[in-house]
Image (cartoon, coloured by chain):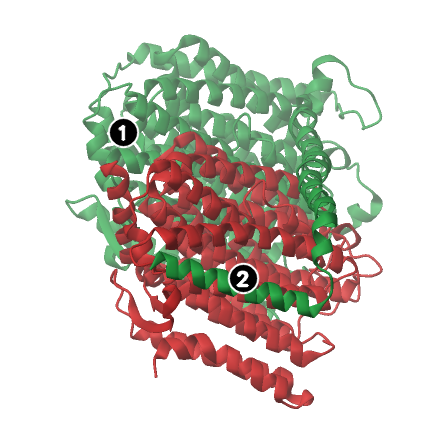
Chain colours: A red, B green
Amino acid sequence: MEILLLQIFIPLIAALIILLSGKSIVKELAGAFSLIPLAITVYLYLNFIPDASTQFLVNLAWIPQFGIQFKAGIDGISMLLLILTNLLIPIIILSSYKHDIKNTKAFYALIFFMQSGLLLVFTALDGFLFYIGWEVALIPVYFICALWGGENRIKVNLKFFIYTIAGSLLMLLAIIYLHLQTHGNSYDIAEFYKLELDSVTQAWIFWAFFIAFAIKMPVFPFHTWQPDTYTEAPTAGTMLLSGIMLKMGIYGAIRWLIPIAPLGFDAWGETALILSVIGVVYASIIAFTQNDIKRLIAYSSIAHVGLISAGIFAWNLQGLQGAMIQMLNHGINVVGMFFIADILIRRMNTREIVEMGGIAKPAPILAITFLIVLLGTVALPLTNGFVGEFLLLMGIYNYNIWLAAIAGLTIIFGAVYMLRMYQKVMLGPVNSSTAMFKDLDGTEKSVLLIISALIIVIGVYPQPILHISEAAVINLLDQVNQKILVK
Amino acid sequence: MINLVWLVPLFPLLGFLINGLGRNTLSKTVVGFIGCITVFASFAVSLGIFFELNSVETKSFIIPIFDWISAGSVKIPFSFLVDPLSALMLLIVTGIGFLIHVYSTGYMHHDTGFAKFFSYLNLFIFFMLLLVLGSNYVVMFIGWEGVGLCSYLLIGFWFTNSSYASAAKKAFVMNRIGDLGFLIAVFLIFTTFNSVEFAIVFPQAANMASGDSVLVLITALLFVGAIGKSAQIPLFTWLPDAMAGPTPVSALIHAATMVTAGIYMIARSNILFTLAPETLGVIAIIGLATLFLAAAIAVTQTDIKKVLAYSTVSQLGYMFLGLGVGAYTGAFFHVITHAFFKALLFLGAGSVIHAMSNEQDMRNMGGLKKKLPLTYVTMMIGTIAIAGLPPFSGFFSKDEILAHVYENNKVFWLIAVIGAIFTSFYMFRMMYLTFNGKFRGTTEQEHHLHESPASMTVPLIILAILSALGGFIGIPEVFGGSHWLAGFLAPVFEASTSKVAHVTLDHATEYILMAVSVGAAIIAMLFAYNRYVKQAHIPADEITGRSGLARLSYNKFFIDEIYDSLITRPLNSLSGFFYRTVDKAGIDGLVNGFGKGALEASKTIRLLQSGMVGFYIFMMVAGIIALLVYSMYKI
């Protein structure tokens, strides 16, 4: 049995078992199941050789008439995203323990269903398979948001769904087009890489993929679905979307967009970079005055993802390696942030930060862990965020000093809106509703202590993580740069 | 000992962890002991390092710890640099840090956050030591931002007070403005020298031409970082607000150590700055403007800590002025003496505030001399030292800076001397208002008046001795001294000294310059004596209007208000505009417009969706056949 198939499909099996299981043990069962993919990832990591090669390759004929294979494998880039996905899912499941979830079985089954889709996206080496994974990951999260979300969930969700589907249809068109251009009509990514299309065609391909990915991340100006969706979704849904799912877009840009359309990237990459940088500043400025805590974090996420995207389109080793490690860091930090928001909202029955205040007094453990997550988010040295932001800004700097200076404003702006939020929520005098605020307990404490530990450990010793993807990233860079040079 | 340098930051880190994790279980005695002993252990190791460095031939050691970040050619090791400059800073940070820790066991004794306070203080020492010890700009940056974090935590230590929490945020954000400059400088250094290690960057830079535009840009950006951290114009307004923190914090972080990090960083990078005369010119002007402005504000303040805060800004201005005219040794000399006397003055002020039941307004003090004799005497020594009267420490360091300024630019010298007059005036004014005359507080305050416990007065006494005698480490040649400090630091500034032709003043000029500044300081002191002791003048209360310059000075030249209306409020309006108009109405409106358009179009197409399953199956089969035909045709 191929280990990679196990990795991808065990969550699906878990979903089925949960649907069939008794209601009383669902949460525990889900928690236990979520550790199996993580264990497999640990096994894969231990047996992974950090060179540029693709390992644990699976290549099965699937629908040979149409040139569709089940081809998947892991290189350093995929490895990091497997770690991200399988590390965060258990945390997200654990963080949902305090919620009374109606129809619990369906809820957890959908999460596992989505996990399989995500793992497929991050390992697929076949265009069709990639697309399948892409949609398989979307549908469960749509239902999670639509069934367990807030008051406006239906309207907001419909927009999110249509918007992302519209993007992915463009991508599907591009994939089919590429398929028709290959020798022997293949969907194999290696065949896509071999194509030598003229630069005008590549520009079209670039935009078709870029819009799909830009909506997913999201990159300015394709972002307007995001704050509403993050705000209305149940916390687990928001965590899945922001912690893991948006990385599909970033990953797609690295694996599919730029290597497949290098000349399109050569012509339009700068535009994408500038849009990303605009997003950093724009979303930060909006975050200054947000009073809804989830919306504030949502806008801050747009800013942070904009920086990652900018690092990719700067297309150099520092930018890409920064993007790789920052995908993991952003996942950890944003899940932590939304979990804290969830705790606050659950206890306070409001999302308005102006109605909170002084919570650090009755809840010192929350105060400390919140601060650590915040410091990771604002990229203080010796937290995970710094390593990523440093490399990303350096990558952007290597492209253009002015863009780096503008993107670097995130260092200042991030401190402004994050500290404002912390002050409004945690500092100042307590009011009648915050005076009796209960500090973290049980699973809440576990989740935030795990997240805090990850933030500091990665910040102090990031080398093992940077090492995973470096060879693969260098390889991809060379491949693309050669094609651009040949032109 | 030098190979054990990693112990120096390790001890306070351990102290932070023990006190942080044990804050609910450990008793105050244990917490205080751990807090102090860890810093003392660091001090002991630092002393060992200092003496070893003195006795060996090599003056620069790099101690690698581990590989921190690497991406391709970018390799950033986590390693430490021990040389005369860092060795001296280690002594200041751990030595004064230890005294302030001891003092805090008394000062903070009744505070419920005692353990939290000590853990933060230890964490600060840890980061400050990283800043000092880093062998490259990025490790230095860890410390640089880390001390900013501790400053944030300690300014907002009493966070239930909203304005304290705001002051903390302001400090962090203003520091971050500088940090962005620092960070971009690091990138530029990397692309220019292919390394961020001091030992690789500086020798390469020494071969570059003076005035090289890259060096000018690098140094200008580094200086932006220094402006934020060391509270110079235009980013100085956070420091007076930082007085919201407990007074030992003001002494340690906002006077003796952290705020001098900018000077340390420039002294460390001296060769880059020496080869960028344009930047040095800007540094001199900013330093001069800051020292004058802050002194002009200090003369009318009535809060004892605010006087000292503006005084710190002003003294930092002197240090930058010194750096700007190339007096690296002089500037660093002033860092040392200032650390002694300003820590002393703040701790003394803390002793006063402690005795006055948390009163900080000098209008409600007066006549404390008899009740607080030790505090009075030690603070007087600090005042004489900062006023620049011989032979106390401030005289030697300030004089060294002023002499270099005179060589460089006579107008600058004159303004700096006027600043020194202000300094002498506001310091003696503070002393007289606090300690002379009649007591003006409430009877309850009077009832509680007491000299502080030994844990607080002993550090005062030690610092008073250092403030009085500390200047003797740099007795200039004109007094027949050998200037030990200059000799000790020579290896650090060697590359710079060989680049600039140094003009030495003749002895007669030096004596005249000294006489002028000392005479001016004495006149200012007498003026203050006449006004606040003889005439027993008390500054007007809040309600009484002030006019002209006094009004400007008392209201800090309205700089906070100007920033608020020029930066903060426009940015917040922009935020609302982006959110409501651009995002919601504009972009999202467009997206929804697309949606509506599609909806309209679909009204016709949806007629195909007849709801009849048979029709759907028919379409599916037709589609599959079409696909098959297509693929056969392709084959």
**Left or right of B314: which side holds A162?**
right
Is tag 2's residue or tag 1's residue first in the polypeptide sequence?
1
Residue at 59% over, 53% down: A164
Dot 2 corresponds to which residue?
A: B623
- Give the number of marks: 2
Dot 1 corresponds to which residue?
A: B271
| Label 2 packing within 10 angstroms: few (<14), some (14-19), many (20+) | few
Of residue B602 and residue B494, the one placed in the foreground of this image is B602
Q: Chain of mark 2?
A: B
Of residue A299 and residue B39, the one placed in the foreground of this image is A299
Residue at 65% over, 65% down: B616
| Label 1 packing within 10 angstroms: few (<14), some (14-19), many (20+) | many
Residue A41, percent from left and from top: 40, 74
Residue A486, percent from left and from top: 23, 38
Residue at 26% over, 42% down: A483
Residue A109, percent from left and from top: 60, 77
